[in-house]
């Protein structure tokens, strides 16, 4: 039987949770950055590194607990070590580096674009994921799917054209004024992050589904290879500002909102891994575009967001395109798509 939790298949549970997580992350991350001036904000490099350490530790714990308890403690540790340092562990270095770049760029994007604009633009991930699936997995797309990709690009462009579509009208918790945004910088960051997201996701799926190795062992390998690239900007930060102790420098201004961002990121990373295992990268795209609707409703209800016609039009095009992309005629072989091999 398919793996389930409380009777709900993990596949659907992870997809819906990912959609909710995506909406939460955009709002929390955006607020954690723009509510402060750049000089009083926390280091995104520290956030990325902390996320990797936490995600890796949780994965290590789960991987360890999955080794049969019949064996003795030292042999379980040895078994885990040989799984983690397997001959093919180097394969994870590629998605690891790409994800670290993406996770750093995400902060640049979210600090320089409106939350809603960022979320819609980030949907271009579907485009890059499809592109890399065609290139790397030799996946063939149907004509409606190509049309859907075109519409996705148009939808993102429409949202991008409008400026300041979403304004927080109430004086409430969210204030956008403290931080000056640079939309061009934000858009370049989001476009690059979409590229690494597509490549890393397809690559991770390929490695995961091409071998028997446990998902949690793969996650540990991914986090281990992330440490070096995630540490590099942190070292740079400290080298340029060494007056205080290194911990004080790295965690300067690292308040509740920063920790909230890190927690939602850790949760999202683990969920993403589950979604890639039990579904695939395309269904993941569908779940995240669902998060646009969730964010939209949450923003209207909670923060009294004002949405312009262009934003609504662009978002609708993105949603229709996503639906069209995933709406496959019954006869198409979704299994080979999920596995990615001819
Ligand atoms: O762009 P996308 O939604 O695919 O983002 C994936 C996120 O999930 C990245 O932040 C990445 O670090 C994380 N991830 C993870 N473990 C995996 C796959 C992705 O932590 N196995």
Image: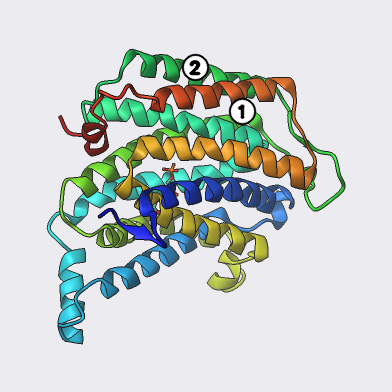
Q: Quadrant of the N terminus?
A: bottom left
**Residue appearing at x 43%, y 20% in the figure:** 149
Report helix, strand or loop for mark 1: helix
User: Relative to residue 130, is residue 254 drawn left or right?
Assistant: right
Q: Is residue 15 visible?
A: yes
Q: Nearer the viewer, residue 165 or 15?
A: 15
Where is residue 318? Give x, y as percent.
54, 25
Q: How many marks?
A: 2
Where is residue 40? Give x, y as percent.
71, 57
Where is residue 322? Give x, y as percent.
47, 27
Q: Are marks 2 and 1 in contact (CB under 8 Å)?
A: no
- Reading the image, the residue beneath label 1 is 184
User: Relative to residue 195, is residue 92 drawn left or right?
Assistant: left
Q: Nearer the viewer, residue 137 or 185?
A: 137
Mark 1: is the Cβ under 8 angstroms from ligand 1?
no
Report helix, strand or loop for mark 2: helix
User: Relative to residue 15, is residue 208 drawn left or right?
Assistant: left
Q: Relative to residue 248, is residue 119 depicted above or below?
A: above
**Residue appearing at x 67%, y 24% in the figure:** 312
Tell me the CA gap for discs 2 and 1.
Answer: 22 Å
> Few, some or many C-alpha atoms within 10 Å of disc 1 (few <14, some 14-19, many ≥20)?
few
Residue 301 falls in image quadrant: top right
Residue furthest to the right: 171
Residue 151 badge: 2
> Few, some or many C-alpha atoms within 10 Å of disc 2 (few <14, some 14-19, many ≥20)?
many
Residue furthest to the left: 87
**Residue appearing at x 64%, y 52% in the figure:** 28
* Upstream in sequence: badge 2 or badge 1: 2
């Amino acid at each position: 039987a398919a793996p389930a939790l409380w009777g709900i298949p993990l596949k659907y549970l992870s997809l819906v949770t990912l959609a909710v997580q995506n909406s939460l992350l955009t709002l929390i991350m955006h607020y954690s950055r723009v509510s402060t001036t750049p000089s009083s904000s926390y280091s995104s490099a520290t956030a990325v590194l902390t996320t990797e350490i936490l995600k890796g530790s949780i994965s290590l714990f789960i991987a360890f607990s999955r080794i049969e308890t019949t064996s003795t403690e030292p042999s379980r540790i040895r078994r885990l070590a040989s799984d983690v340092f397997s001959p093919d562990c180097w394969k994870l270095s590629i998605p690891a580096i790409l994800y670290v770049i993406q996770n750093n760029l995400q902060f640049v994007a979210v600090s320089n674009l409106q939350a809603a604009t960022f979320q819609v633009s980030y949907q271009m991930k579907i485009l890059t994921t499809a592109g890399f699936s065609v290139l790397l997995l030799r996946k063939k797309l149907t004509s409606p799917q190509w049309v859907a990709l075109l519409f996705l690009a148009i939808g993102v462009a429409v949202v991008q054209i409008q400026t300041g579509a979403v304004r927080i009208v109430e004086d409430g918790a969210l204030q956008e004024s403290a931080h000056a945004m640079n939309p061009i910088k934000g858009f370049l960051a989001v476009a690059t992050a979409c590229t690494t997201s597509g490549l890393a996701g397809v690559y991770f799926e390929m490695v995961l589904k091409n071998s028997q190795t446990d998902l949690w062992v793969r996650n540990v390998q991914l986090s281990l290879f992330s440490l070096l690239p995630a540490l590099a900007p942190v070292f740079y930060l400290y080298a340029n500002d060494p007056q205080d102790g290194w911990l004080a420098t790295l965690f300067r201004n690292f308040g509740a909102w920063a920790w909230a961002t890190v927690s939602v990121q850790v949760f999202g990373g683990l969920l993403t891994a589950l979604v890639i295992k039990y579904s695939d990268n395309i269904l993941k795209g569908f779940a995240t575009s669902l998060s646009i609707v969730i964010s939209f409703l949450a923003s209207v209800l909670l923060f009294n967001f004002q949405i312009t016609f262009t934003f609504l039009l662009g978002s609708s095009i993105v949603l229709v395109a996503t639906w069209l992309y995933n709406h496959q005629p019954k006869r198409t072989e979704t299994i080979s798509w999920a596995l990615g091999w001819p």
